[in-house]
Image: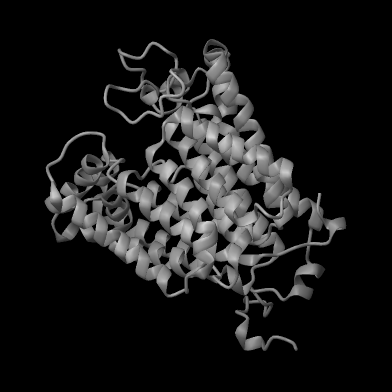
């Protein structure tokens, strides 16, 4: 049955902005295979580009912040062009609305604080655009992407653990962050690694390896742990469909990452993905938004138990974020303290609310809770994993959660599972 014209927004020429399938085929510049290659390449490059730049810095080539910005802008622009070329469709409405909301918020906040709120624009673009790219990917492309990332991370991780000097010679993470982020190596750090690689007394440690906390291709430890959590979520969604070899590579990589990077919260998320494999499909849709609210309520209870707690344990990190909310006034929730929030990048929820306003927080909550389909086992596992990962990580962190190195991968998977599109074998590269 043809779609009524009034349901498709029209351009001034009278042509529909939201293309029908036949319209898409008629105006397509890229073949289905080429589209899948690009869909594969965008999150792959987003995840790996820092490692490639670090290799150049380690060889003495001049790489700076402008290069990093140019690459990220190019990735986001390419994602947008891919979506336009393939034709906008009704299911693009949610991510487009999210991007529009973040753009409006960024403009208003910029006028308030007198500083361009690039952080807000970037967050909305990464989440929305990579969701849309995921819509256009097949499960075969998603599986190929994660297999190669698991393999690359595993190989580089083995180099880092068993030949640290060789890893530093190839990547020299401390030099990369000094050149591109202005973060100089600490006077206590002479390893050539990122400053947080060396553990301090009392910090969580599996105790299996005595090497510094690992970072693999991510060059810093938090994103390395986040990749393990996202990888476990992927295996929970696709584990039965990818074959024994790919499943084994994924499991080995995740375990190796966790026990070498000593990631506390990510280890809990991996356990949740394992247990949730059987539990999440049994839970009704309504329980998802209720659970995310309960998660926030539990955090508030923990924070108020000892709001003045200090330290790098869970109580200390939660209390740190809670103190920010306690000290801010009502104007903070409308974006008036965005510049201060940017300076406190690891304050979790207060950073996100401060840079996007309370309306941005509400928008991402609605997006994460109601975008997943929740009509089969894989989509329910993804939905619950997304809620626990995103809103759980915001308790103790923020910038790492919004890093394109892992955020692009997460939202690409969300979009792919949401669409659950499958091409014929002849159309998959």
Q: Residue at x 33, y 56 (%)?
A: 356
Question: Which color scheme is applied?
Answer: one colour
Q: Could you tell me if residue 191 is visible in this image?
A: yes
395, above or below 192, in the image: below
Q: Residue at x 58, y 13 (%)?
A: 59
150, above or below 174, in the image: below
Percent x, y of residue 342: 29, 43
2, above or below 413, in the image: below
Percent x, y of residue 47: 57, 39
The mark total stands at 0
Q: In front here: 194 or 232?
A: 232
Q: In front here: 253 or 349?
A: 253
Left or right side of 284 for 236: right
Q: Residue at x 26, y 46 (%)?
A: 341
**Quarter location, residue 353:** bottom left
Q: Which residue is drawn at 67% across and 40% down?
A: 248
Q: In front here: 292 or 428?
A: 292
Left or right side of 176 for 342: left
Percent x, y of residue 284: 47, 74
Image quarter in which the N terminus is found: bottom right
Percent x, y of residue 276: 49, 58
Q: Which residue lies furthest to the right in this view?
A: 426
Left or right side of 399 for 419: right
Q: Could you tell me if residue 149 is visible in this image?
A: no
């Amino acid at each position: 049955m043809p779609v009524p014209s009034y349901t498709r927004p029209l351009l001034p020429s009278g042509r529909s902005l939201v293309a029908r399938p036949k319209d898409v085929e008629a105006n397509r510049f890229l073949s289905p295979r080429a589209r899948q290659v690009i869909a594969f390449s965008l999150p792959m490059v987003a995840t790996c580009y820092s490692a490639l730049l670090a290799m150049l810095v380690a060889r003495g080539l001049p790489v700076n912040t402008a290069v990093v910005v140019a690459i990220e802008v190019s990735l986001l622009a390419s994602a947008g062009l891919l979506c336009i070329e393939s034709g906008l469709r009704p299911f693009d409405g949610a991510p487009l609305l999210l991007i529009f909301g973040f753009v409006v918020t960024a403009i208003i906040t910029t006028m308030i604080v007198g500083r361009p709120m690039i952080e807000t624009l970037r967050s909305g673009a990464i989440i929305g655009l990579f969701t849309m790219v995921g819509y256009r990917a097949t499960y075969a492309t998603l599986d190929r992407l994660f297999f190669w990332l698991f393999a690359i991370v595993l190989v580089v991780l083995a180099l880092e653990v068993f030949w640290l000097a060789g890893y530093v010679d190839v990547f020299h993470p401390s030099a990369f962050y000094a050149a591109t982020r202005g973060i100089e190596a600490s006077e206590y750090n002479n390893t050539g690694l990122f400053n947080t690689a060396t553990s301090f007394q009392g910090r969580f440690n599996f105790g299996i390896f005595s090497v510094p906390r690992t970072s693999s291709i991510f060059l810093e430890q938090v994103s390395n742990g986040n990749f393990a959590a996202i990888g476990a979520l992927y295996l929970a969604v696709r584990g039965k469909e990818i074959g024994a070899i790919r499943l084994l590579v994924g499991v080995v990589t995740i375990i190796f990452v966790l026990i070498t990077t000593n990631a506390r919260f990510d280890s809990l998320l991996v356990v949740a993905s394992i247990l949730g494999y059987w539990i999440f499909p049994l839970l009704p849709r309504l329980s998802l938004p209720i659970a995310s609210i309960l998660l926030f309520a539990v955090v508030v209870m923990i924070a108020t138990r000892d709001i003045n707690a200090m330290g790098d344990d869970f109580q200390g990190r939660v209390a740190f974020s809670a103190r920010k909310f306690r000290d801010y006034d009502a104007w903070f929730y409308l974006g008036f303290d965005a510049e201060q929030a940017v300076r406190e990048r690891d304050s979790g929820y207060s950073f996100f609310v401060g840079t996007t306003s309370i309306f941005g927080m509400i928008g991402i909550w609605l997006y994460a809770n109601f975008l997943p389909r929740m009509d089969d086992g894989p989509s329910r596992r993804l939905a619950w994993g997304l809620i626990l990962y995103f809103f759980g990580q915001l308790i103790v962190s923020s910038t790492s959660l919004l890093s394109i190195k892992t955020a692009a991968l997460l939202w690409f998977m969300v979009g792919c599972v949401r669409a659950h599109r499958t091409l014929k074998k002849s159309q998959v590269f």
